[in-house]
Structure formats: structure tokens, C-alpha cells
Image (cartoon, coloured by chain):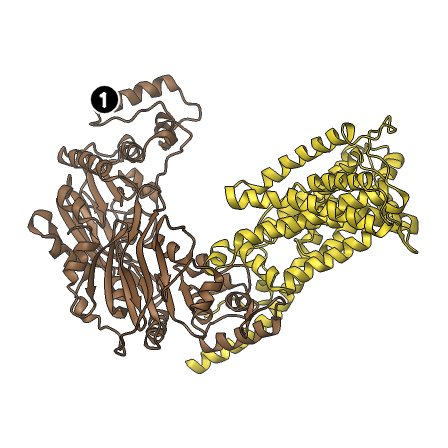
Amino acid sequence: MKVPPQDNRIPDRALAVSTHGMTMRFANFYALRDASITIAAGSFHVLLGENGAGKSTLVKCMMGFYRPTSGQISIDGQEVDIPDPRAAHELGLGMVYQHFTLVPSLTAAENLVISRADAPARIDWKTEREGLAAFMEKMPFKVPLGIPVGRLAAGEKQKLELLKQLYLGRRFLILDEPTSVLTPAEADELLGMVRGLTEAGELTCLMISHKFREVTAFADEVSVLRRGEHVGGGKVSDLSTSEMAAMMIGDKELVRPAARLPFIGKPVLEMAGAKAPDRSGLKTIEIDGLAVKSGEVVGIAGVSGNGQMELMELLTGQRPLEKGAIRVKGAAYRASREEARRFNVRYLPEEPLKNACAPKMTVAENIYFRDFDFLGGKTQFWLDGRRMKQEAGRLVGEYKVKTASLNAPIASLSGGNVQRAVLAREFTGAVDLLVIANPCFGLDFSAVAEIRARIMAARNAGAAVLLISEDLDEILELSDRILVMSDGHIAYETPAEGADIGEIGRHMAGHH
Amino acid sequence: MTLQADLAAGLAAKQSSVADYAGRILQPLFLPLAAVVAGMIVFSGFLLLVGKSPIDFYMIVYKAGFGTSFSWANTLARAAPLLLAALCVALPARLGLVVIGGEGAIVLGGVAAGTVGMMVPGLPGVLGILAMAIAASVTGAIWIGGIGALRHYRGVNETISSLLLAYIAIALMNHLVEGPLRDPASLNKPSTVPLPEAYRIGEIPGIGVHWGLAVGIVACILCWVLIERTTWGFAARIVGGNIRAAQVQGLPAGLLMIGFTALGGVFAGLAGMFEVAAVHGSANASLAAGYGYTGILIAFLARHNGLAVIPAAILFAGFEASSGLVQRRLGLPDATIVVFEGMIFIAILLSDALQDKIDFRTLFRIRGRS
């Protein structure tokens, strides 16, 4: 039975929110299973979990973006129905996203006023400014209201996002990795403010985070999700970071490394003193002494956004090196087509449709990308359409790519089949170095098993494999050696055999 | 279960190959034709508003553009520069670049040809024409290839830069033709010195149209072969399809962009050369006749396919050829045809937006893939 709240007005104090048996099923995949979490009024609660653990799914159910398959939400002990985000807002629930949702060309004041659901068609700025000034008086921190938001620093913008939620009268706030675009100092300031508001009983906060440092410094309580299930939690004061990491990662001993042939080869890929700016241009990626030998899978673990994608771009030649060198089989390597062909270097970038395919070109054409200009040791001028059809037909059969026809645009295939088509293209012929990023992200279990088996087969055949992945299970299953990337450099290295999971987790969290 | 799945897959494959075929043949034809018809219908409304009969209008356009052998000759003569101008849009477009300033390369190509004729007038005819063609090609290649280079090295938006550079090219042409290159004898229309008779390009025997038409058609066919049948064209299509994928494959995306824009510029420059050597006899302000802009419409109507450029260019050449008769018979201003073409262009752009929404294959396919 659903009981609407008796009073439509949002109370002017922090809300207590709890979920009961929250389950979200997509087809036959459970993104969230029977998650019951209680967040006390005025607490600062953190939701921990690896990528894909169900954190976003849970908060999206709470905010009405998803309709849960089953389960309820209650606010201050009363069961409520949240069919859409607007209903969540009316109940006093709000969310601050990882990325900004403000209009950059408008001032802070304008952004605040237009965000109101009851903003009038004609705005009386005099009254509004007075109202805003009165509101700001009560706030523990200030943001300049008169200048366009686009000119504010990232930390100020995120503060404004927070102010906006308070201005709209939200009393339960979900923060989705709010500090990922902030510097550490800005992050501390913002979280300190949130902490102050929760202690004053003005606000309850549920924050999604990967960073243990933020959890131990600011939060009261923590809930851990793993594979869609609520696996534990408690008071932050009662838990150590290694205990939290263990809950997040689970019993990794159960993941058996894939069968492998013992093999010690020569180094194929070497990076020495390599330096380049990261995507934001603020930090530097520094990779030194990375070597991958033939017949070895080196797994690079890490929380997303710690420089893994930049490393991939360095290796594919999409990001120029500032200093240092990349060597393949002892020779300098700049990732030209000719070099990649000579040294048998193959790439599997993440999100293959976005990074490895031309979506509107056909399946056959996409499979032909690597071979179209080269045959029997010579570059070709004429495009051999018959060879394209034959190769594509053979490979589609061999790799079981499900497609309506060879002439279908590759964008019409499912994610698993796009990845199979890319594997078919890249794994054919001699492979000496394989550079892979998140190969199984978003794929179903059968595709995952098959793709990992193909990677192991390439390793066992003597390829050197560099596997960059945010999925620690994948790293543990496939790697011979594990490196942890944190803050743009390699922070930790261990043989996969007998690796200490807690140690890996702590280095992933940037906690030495 | 697997047997069922196999059967279902087999059935789906059969249906989809028919669907595929229909989709591949019909879709590229249907939308552009529908766009032309839609543009004609909207323009009819416009004519009715000013009290003119759409039926009269289209009859006159047909008669003046395609009705008699004389009108065909007129249309085809106009088609020659349009074919080449359209290639200057279609080639870069295959790499995902929208270059709309072919007019600049036409104008400067014409000036370059006129200058060669003026500076080295004594060569035998064939060599003279060849020298003019090379000068015009190189000028066009530098002008449009430079736009590709700006895009690759400096990230300058090629649409804006090509358009603005076209105005600069026209101003440059005016400066040269009215100043340093002016023939003192050209009094009321500043021009370069008329080309020697040996340098003039004549007509293709029998059809009364200059050789530019043949060159244009051959160029269209060569471009189609280049794009569809060579590995360079395939590499260009990969760059146009997804530049990130092209980079991961190690393809020289920047070189391809510069090369294909430069080749587009070669064709636009040649269009200017033919205007000078076959039509005007000297370089003057008549070079800026808007062929470069009409070329944009043609390339989009042809979906940047070299072979399809040929009929599309002839269609638009016919429209332009009818402009005079439309003015005389219906008493409409000379901008009428431009408005008409503009409406067709808007309809083509709209049809582009619809392209992915209307999938012909779904019309032939049973829903519910497993």
C-alpha cells in the first residue's frame, strides 16, 4: 500500500531515507538485487563499490529515473511512490551529478532562479535578488552570484550545484562522485561544507565515491555494493580501509586464473620515462619501466580516470609523448600503420563501436580495416572487394558474429557482436603485441567468457598482452603480472600469483 | 533450442538479404528524389502567393532546360563547371569535412589560367592549355588544400574558413583584374588580356558544348573510382566514418584530409580554367558566377557520390539555364531560380536528418530478432 505524505511541504530539516529490497532487473541481468539500505537523518553516508556494482542503479531508482523491478523507498518512515524525478524533487530529494548541470552563460543568480519549478514566466529580478540575498545569508558558504557561471572555477561551480539543491529546498542529497572534477583542496572544502550541513541537521547526504580518503575523512556511515548486492557496511569509525576494500572487492580467491602455459619470452613492449599531459591538461601521466614480455599478460588495474585512457592513447599514437620513449621489440615505436604492421601490434580500444569501428560502414568493410591496403608483403592501390567479402564471410563464421548480413551497418549489431567483429579483425594473423582496454565492458556473460578465452589463446601463442581494465576480476583472471595505476603513474606491481588483494585495493584507492 | 535458433537465424538471414538489397538500392535514391519533389511543392506555394501558376513555371523550366537540342546544349555548357565545383564539395565530404568555399578556388583558378595565357602566350595550343590547366589546378589545390591543412594542424573549422576565404579570393581576383593584371583595352569590364586564339578551348564535335563537360564527367567517374575502388578512397571513408578508429588503425588522417581537400581544389580550379579558356576568353568578374555555391547543392543532392553528381549537376544546370526564360515569360525576378534551388536544398538537408530515421530495411524485416 502506498501512503502519500500527509503534508505536501518539504520539512525544513534533514530527511531519513531507506530502501527495502530494491531490485532492478534488465532482461535477465540483475543490476541490483534486494538492496536494503538505511540512511539516518542528518548523516553523511557513502555508497562504495566497483564499477558496475549497482551504485548508480540504486540512486537512479531512488530519484525516479528507473522504476525498480521490486522494492520500496520510505522517507521518514513513510513509504512513498517515486514514479519520476519530479516526484523525487517534490519529496525533497535532490542529486548533484559528476558533471555540471548549470547554464554556463547565465549568472549564478539566474541559474538558481530558473531552476525553480515555479519560476514565473516574467521574472521580477528585484524581488528575486532580495530573496536570494536573504537565502545566501543563511548559507555557510558563498558563491559570487553576479558573474556568468562559465567563468567560475570547477570547485565554485560544484559549490553552486550544492547551493542550488539547498535553494530548491532539498533535504536529502545524492552526490554522484562530486569531487572527480575537483582538485584535492577544492574537494576537501566542498565535502567539509556538506559535512557541516549534515551535522547541523539541515541535510542528509548519500555520496557515491571510490575514494577511501574522502570516506574516512568526512563520512559517518558506509554501505558497500558488490555485483548488485548490498554486502556490508557500518559506521566509518568501526571499519578500516582494508576492511572496506575487502568488502568492495569480495573473495577474489574464488576467481581462478585462466589456464595458461608457462612461458618466459623477451620483452616486446617497453616504455621508459614516458611523460605526457592528461586529458584535462592539469596533471601529467608518467610511465617508467613498463615492460611486457612475449607470452605474458600484464594487467593494469585502477579506478577509472587515473590515466589509463591516456596510456592507451599514448600507445595508439593519438597522444604525443612529451618525453621518453615507447619501444617495440627494441625499436622506437610511433604507432604508424607501417610500424604496427611490421611489429604485429594490435589494438582493442574500449567501447569498440566508438573507438574501433566506423558505425555507418558495413560489417565487411569494418572487418577489412586492417588488411585492405596490404597483401603478400606489398601495399595495394586497388581495393579488392572480393577479398573483402571472402575474408569477412570467413571471419564472421569463425568468430560467430551474429549479423543480418555482411552489408549491414556495424552499428546495427549488438555490443558483443561488434566486439567479436573487432576481435576477428585484430586477432587474425601473427600477433606479437596486443594492447587492450576494457574489452568486456557492458557485454553479457557468454561474450565475456569467449573474449577472455581469445585473449588467453593469443597469450599462449606467444603474444605480449597489455590489458588495461577497470574490472579487477578480469585483471586477476587473465594477468601474469598486475600493475596498479593511480594518479597518472604506476603505483604498485605484483605477480598475479599470490597477489594481495587488500594491497591492490589500497593502491587503487590512492591509499599507500 | 539450438536447432530452432539456427532455423530462425537462417530465416532472418534470408529475409534480411532481400531487405538489405532493397535498402541499399532504394534508400539512396528515394530520399534525394523525395527532397527535390518536396522542394518543388513548397516552391509552388511560393509561386501561388505571388499569383503565378506553378504549372507554367515548371513547364518553362522544362522547356528552357531540357526541351530542345538548343536548351540541352545550354544546360550542358552550364553543367561543365558545376560538375567540377560539386566534386570540390563531395570529395572532402567523404572525410567528414564540409567545404563550402569552392567558389574561391574557381575564381583564383580562372585568374591563374588567364595569367598564364597573358605571360606565356607563344606556346603551341596544347601546351598552352596544359600550362593553364596546371596553373589553375595548383592554385585550387593550394587554396582548398590549405583549408584542409588549417583544419588538421590548427583545428580551424573548415566550413567557416572555406566560406570566408571564398570572399577573400573574390576580392583578390577583383584587385588583380582591375589592377596589375588589367588589360588596358578592357574599358567597361576590367579583364585580363584576351587569351591567344590557340589557347581557347573549343567544342566537343556534334553537341555544341565545350570540352569542359567531358573533363567534368571523366573527373566525376575518376572520383567515384578513387573513393569506391581504391585503398586510398577506403582509407578516406574510414577517416570520414570515425577518425578515432582511423587513428587507432594508424591511418594518416591528416595527410588524407589535406590530400582530398587539395584534390577537390584541383577540380574547382579547373572549373575556373574552363570558364576562362572556353567561355569568357579572359579572366574577369564573371568568374564569380556562383557555380561554387550551386556545387554545394549538387554534392549534397548526390550524397557526395561522384557518379550521382553527374545527373544532379545536369538537373541544376537545367534550372539555371531556365532563369532567363522564367524572367521573360512570367515576369519574375532573376533571383527566382535561386529561391527555388534554396528550397530544394533545405528539403535535401531535412532529408539528410531523416536518413537514419527511415530505414528501408525495417520495412522488409519482421520484427523481433532473438
Residue A499, quarter of picture: bottom left
Can residue A452 be seen by looking at this rendering? Answer: yes
Q: How many marks overall?
A: 1
Q: Residue at x 49, y 63 (%)?
A: A338
- Residue appearing at x 41%, y 66% in the figure: A345
Q: Position of residue A291 (x, y in %)?
A: 29, 63
Q: In the rendered image, is residue B300 in sight?
A: no
Question: In the image, is A478 to the left or to the right of B91?
Answer: left
Residue B78 drawn above or below residue A162: below
**Residue A89 at x, y = what percent?**
30, 39
How packed is label 1: few (under 14 Cα within 10 Å), some, or many (20 or more)? Answer: few
Residue A173: which quarter of the image?
A: top left
Which residue is rendered at x = 82% and y = 29% of the image?
A: B190
- In this rendering, the answer to whether B329 lies above or below A417 is above
Q: Position of residue A494 (x, y in %)?
A: 19, 64
In the picture of the structure, the residue carrying the numbered disc 1 is A137
Reply above or below: A59 against A466. above
The reply, left or right, for residue B327 in relation to residue A185 is right
* Residue B209 location (% of width, % of height): 87, 50
**Against B247, is A268 above or below?**
below
Residue nearer the viewer, A56 or A321:
A321
Image colour assigned to chain B: yellow
Is residue A509 toward the left or the right of residue A319 in the image?
A: left
Q: Which chain is brown?
A: A
